[in-house]
Amino acid sequence: MTTAMTNPMTTRPSPDDSGRVRTLAQPAGFGQDVTSVAARALRQILRDPEAVIPSLFVGVFFYAVQVGVLQDLVMASSPAGLDFKAFLLPMGIVFAITGVSRAAALVTDIQSGYFDRLLVTPIRRTALLLGLMIADLVLVLVLASLVSVAGLLFGVRFVTGPLGFISFLALCALWGLAFAGFPYAVALRTGNPAAVNASFLLFMPFAFLSTAFVPRDAMTGWMAEIVQYNPVTYLLEALRALLMVGWDGPVLAQGIGAVGAVFVVTLTLSALALRGRVSRA
Amino acid sequence: MRKPSEHQSPTGAIVATRLGRDFGGTPAVRSLDLHVQRGEIYGFLGPNGAGKSTTVRMLCTLLAPTSGQATVAGCDLDTDPGQVRLRIGVALQGSSLDESQTGRELLRLQGRLYGLDRVTIDRRVAEVVDLVGIGESIDDLIKTYSGGMKRRLDLAGSLVHQPDVLFLDEPTTGLDPASRARMWAEVRRLNDAGTTIFLTTQYLEEADALADRVGIIVDGSLVVEGTPAELKRQIGRDIVIATVSEPQVATAVEALTSVPAAEDVTAHGDTVTMSVADGAATLLAIATTLDRAGVSVRSLATRTPTLDDVFLHHTGGRFEADAPTDATPEQGVSA
């Protein structure tokens, strides 16, 4: 490594007329703060693909295996015309994108002191979280698109066309961000990687106590009761509507409302946790 | 020499008045008065846990004081922390870096967060890379850097926006002697260019070598401050150091206590130290006294006071740090 010392005369800060150093710093603007944080997070993702590949694998694997295992069984007991490959595609996507966040990287920043380095800059504090969520948004869209490609390879087609596909991705992205609020809140509150990993357990009830694998009509007993209270049920039904039914306003409104409610709750939790973390008290 | 309680001028790079910080009722910093002049290197010296880092974290806006007030670069910490952040550069204790970035990416991000335009970022990154001597490694991932390079990159990151006031929190802790010397040279160079530097250290020789003025903090309180020369002159006496066989240390202390010219006779391990008015003139009398007491002397030396002696004088204890001790040349004889 090169460590040669250099001529100090060429590298001095520039004093003003009074001989004093004058800072060059000025407020960067909120947009630049957010894009700076997001760009750094996206660079980290590109350098650390092994942190993302498992999510993609889980989504595609569950989708392919469930199609293979359950298709004949479900088709035999379901109304005629059900496209089970299309029915399961939202499940694959939800499995791939739920829990995707930069919360673990945020904890690393907190523990390494890099978060403090950012805090002594003039950066707007909200940009520290929003920038990461922008990076999450990009990643969730990429993952949802890739799992969708798996569906297309299985012969699935969107009845709502390209605009429906874009709406489909947008709803997926909203869910990805809504769930990411949990690990961010835990990361900012605790600064503890184990706690962030544990927060992923929330994925289980959200994903499995829903209509991920079986239509609501086919459920009975306690499961049929519980899935009504899971926002993922309404997300899946909205996604399936875009995929298989068409522009079903009430179903889409329920899906957007349910996911939006989760988003508001988790964003509030993570914003409060951020406020606590950056507090000087 | 100025005692910390004396009146402070309202102008200066850092002005703190009765600054304090508690954690759950436990005071970490107590009623601290500071006045650091523009263009000065102020050495903030103290052992681990003395309150140095808490003070820095208050002055660089990471922690709110629980009492008192302060201005940094003319901006109030409490009412205007955003303006303070624009004017300071901070290299916190340990290298607070994102090791997944390259050095250049880290510096460019710093520049963006300080609102510099692309051209200025390019120019400043080139300047600070040149200044800290990272060279072509600037485009390598930080996780491949040595400890010394990380500290220098940390310093470079705090300089991209050309701060008015630079805080360096134990910048050389854990560095090898060569890296430490390089860091000292960089600190001097920055100061030559007009940057005010607030330097915390647990290394006495670092404060002695770099600081225009030194403040010694113990248990959250500033016990004394002044230039290193003033502080050492305050001791006003030479130090004599005798190394004897360990079982005879108590005998040596007892014998030397009877020497009229010797004061503050203390023992640490096999070393007995004392202060005398004139070291060279007293050395023979001390040697004779030890010989008469039957003490086997391995070496006997005299030196001028160091900051360690200043610390001993004001606190009653030796400075404890995981660093080499003061390297003042000694004169003397070996047995």
Image (cartoon, coloured by chain):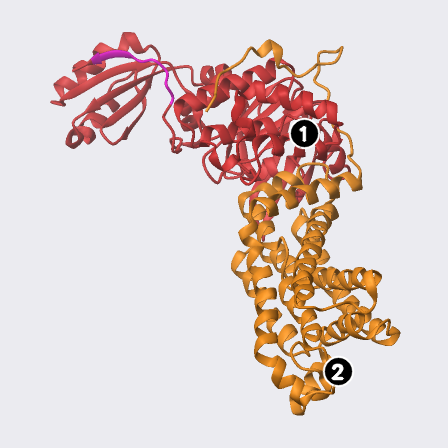
Relative horizontal placement of residue A65, taking residue B118 as reference (left or right): left
Q: Looking at the image, which residue is at 66% across and 68% down?
A: A154
Please give the residue where the numbered disc 1 appears in the rendered image.
B88
> Does residue B54 sit above or below A134 in this rendering?
above
Please give the residue where the numbered disc 2 appears in the rendered image.
A81
Residues flagged by tags 1 and 2 on a common chain = no
Q: On the image, which quarter does residue A153 sit in?
A: bottom right
Q: Looking at the image, which residue is at 77% across and 35% down?
A: A28
Chain shaded orange = A
Residue type marked 2: Gly
Q: Which residue is at the front of the view, A225 or B2? A: A225
Q: Which residues are magenta?
A: B326-333
Q: Secondary structure at mark 1?
A: strand
Residue A138, horizontal then vertical, whole percent:
71, 52
> Does residue A192 sit above or below A86 in this rendering?
above
Q: Which residue is at the front of the view, B297 or A57? A: A57
Residue type marked 1: Ile
Q: On the image, which quarter does residue B263 sit in?
A: top left
Relative horizontal placement of residue A4, taking residue B277 as reference (left or right): right
Q: Looking at the image, which residue is at 56% across and 50% down?
A: A49
Q: Chain of mark 2?
A: A
Q: Chain of mark 1?
A: B
Alpha carbon of mark 1 to alpha carbon of mark 2: how far?
Answer: 68 Å
Main secondary structure type of the part rendered in magenta: loop
Chain shaded red = B
Q: Secondary structure at mark 2?
A: loop
